[in-house]
Amino acid sequence: MSTVHTVTDSPPAGALSASILRRLNHALRVTGLPVIGIGVFLFLWQLAASNINTSLGQFPGPVEVKEQALNLYQEHVREREKADAFYARQEARNAKKLENTPDAKIKWRSYTGKPTFIDQIFTSLYTVSFGFLIATLIAVPLGVICGLSDSVYRAINPIIQVFKPVSPLAWLPLVTMVVSALYMSDDPLFEKSFLTSAFTVALCCLWPTVINTTVGVSGIDRDLVNVSRVMALPTLVHVQKIVLPSAIPMIFTGLRLSLATGWMVLIAAEMLAQNPGLGKFIWDEFQNGSSNSLGRIMVAVITIGLIGFLLDKIMLGLQKRSSWDKQAILR
Amino acid sequence: MANNYLDISGVGITFPTDNGPFCALENVNLRIDEGQFIALIGHSGCGKSTLLNILAGLEQATSGGAILQGQVVDEPGPERAVVFQNHALMPWLTVYQNVELAVKQVFKGRKSKREMREWTEHNLQLVHMEHALDKLPGEISGGMKQRVGIARCLAMQPKVVLMDEPFGALDALTRAHLQDSLMEIHAELGNTVVMITHDVDEAVLLSDRIVMMTNGPAATIGEILEVELPRPRDRLALAENPDFNHVRQQVLKFLYAKQRNPALLEENAAPKETPASEPTPLRAVNDSEAA
Ligand SMILES: Nc1ncnc2c1ncn2[C@@H]1O[C@H](COP(=O)(O)OP(=O)(O)O)[C@@H](O)[C@H]1O
Ligand SMILES: [Mg+2]
């Protein structure tokens, strides 16, 4: 071990090798163990997959899934090229028309190809963000009010407790009908299906944030509240300077739970309502039933997992940035 | 001389509890002159904090009330600023911002931005904290936090400074430093101060009058001692001073002979023949001397 580094004027070889050992050990724990875990998982997956036969062929193993992922990406690239070509042709045609007769009426059509896997990813992300945003805008102020006022809390608590355990999919038909009935516009800013998905997500995102914000706000140190009363801070300043900063950790705990719930709910809602997004992609592949379908579904499953993980990482980053307690251990 | 600056009359408070109403204070009467330093002493749980909170307006008396300069105290306000035992600084604000929050609120529209900054810094200088303006409370020691709490309180330019065991959580050396600082500040600004303490030496060293409370429930003021030691007071010189020791003895006698610690009473309850007025238990006296 002492031959690893031969630096002149260095601490004794024994101490050096000990410190290297410690660092190696640390590196192994940080990167080595997860790699081993993933390796074992892939091996077991392959083993299991080769023993499961379905009516659509063998269950996809890691290799098959990797191929399908590449396929899906290439399909996306091809579709983009087609779209670009379409727009280029259209532009050329229109330019020519204008040359011949300057006052000619020009039609611009948008390309109507089938949305690709990548398109569906972005649709889902966009939908979940919108729903989550609506929920946050309602839930945080509501939670703050419930936390500040015991009377409001007592009035609202039963409603929260009853609606919280309702499965999002139970809401779906209602939301669909309400959106269809109320949202009538000739030139809609949003698709109806988009709104249906987003509102369903929002309904399910509400509760964890409301509850955690309430708990956070009502748990403020009594001394701090008393200081604020002695200073005679107006309510808004009190909320801004004392309530929000001290409830931030709990608010974020709620937001992270909400976003995770929202993401799960969205996929299910898309499958059930045939609204665009990753859920619809999975459902379509299932209905297609080609020999590639299971592999493609598996790609979607892993993508959903990775995105969920990423969303949580983003929230964690935001939480770390906005929390005053930099020492707090956040996971 | 007596100007009845702060007049507490007939104050009583009853808390509704699960076991029926609990009368914590009954018929508390006290008149405090402007610029006086009052120490409030009594066994733990007798109702000192409750009385202070009533003066602060944080708690409403069930009967009687307090009048400050002719005005009834019925809500909290910066003219009766409080120093809390556990500093109560906002952990997400720096030392400077903590004081600034109070200054901005109290002098809104009365001081310019620059004057507010100078006033904030001035008050932090007063407690010798000008070196740590940008530190967060989590980054400074307990004694320093308490200094900032005092600066925040003074920055509100209160008519009365209310302190609830401000040095109770500090070690003896830090406490002595802060006591000296507090004496300096009091000499300079002449605030009216009501301070709760459980430390007999502290009470005698700092105050003009020591208000001793009887044990609860239905606690009230048992005795009031005038401390007529000349100021400025020096803790080393006082240790030999017979007047100082006399006052100290009287407080100890009140606390440990007349109003024995309820916890100790229970301890001694088993052998029934033990008279309640037996000599002061050594342990208790030693405790307060060590403090
Ligand atoms: N909000 C309350 N509800 C019920 N009892 C209370 C309340 N506040 C204080 N008490 C009771 O009043 C008594 C005095 O409390 P406190 O003023 O905190 O004592 P001290 O500060 O002298 O140690 C205690 O017995 C306490 O249990
Ligand atoms: Mg107390």
Image (cartoon, grey):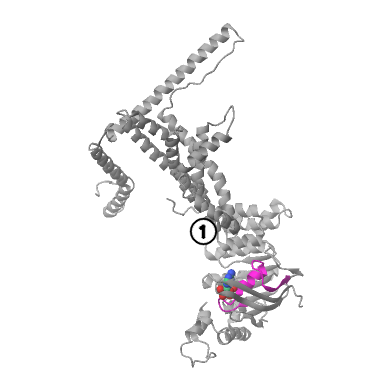
Where does the magenta region start and end?
Answer: B40-67
Question: Could you tell me residue A318's position as x and y percent?
Answer: 49, 45
In this view, the residue farthest toward the top is A100
Ligand 2 within 8 Å of disc 1? The answer is no
The foreground one among B63 and B206 is B63
- Hey, what amino acid is under mark 1? Gly
Give the residue at x 44% y 29%. A119
**In the image, residue A259 lies in the stretch drawn in magenta:** no
Which residue is disc 1 drawn over? Answer: B138
The foreground one among A144 and A187 is A187
Whether residue A129 is visible to the viewer of this picture, yes or no, is no
**In the image, residue B57 lies in the stretch drawn in magenta:** yes
Q: How many marks?
A: 1
Q: Disc 1 sits on a residue from what chain?
A: B
Q: Quadrant of residue A234?
A: bottom right
| Vertical comparison of A136 with A246: above or below | above
Give the residue at x 31% y 28%. A290
In the rendered structure, the answer to whether residue A268 lies left or right of residue A49 reads: right
Whether residue B287 is visible to the viewer of this picture, yes or no, is yes
Question: Could you tell me residue A21's position as x and y percent?
Answer: 28, 51
| Vertical comparison of A241 with B268: above or below | above
| Vertical comparison of A51 with A99: above or below | below
Q: Quadrant of residue B48?
A: bottom right
Give the residue at x 40% y 38%. A304
Question: Could you tell me residue A171's position as x and y percent?
Answer: 49, 42
Question: Could you tell me residue A316's position as x and y percent?
Answer: 46, 46
| Vertical comparison of A299 with A84: above or below | below
Give the residue at x 62% y 10%. A103
- Mark 1 is surrounded, within 10 Å at the Cα level, by few (under 14), some (14 to 19) or many (20 or more) other residues, namely some
In the rendered structure, the answer to whether residue B13 lies left or right of residue A135 reads: right
In the rendered structure, the answer to whether residue B160 lies left or right of residue B236 reads: right
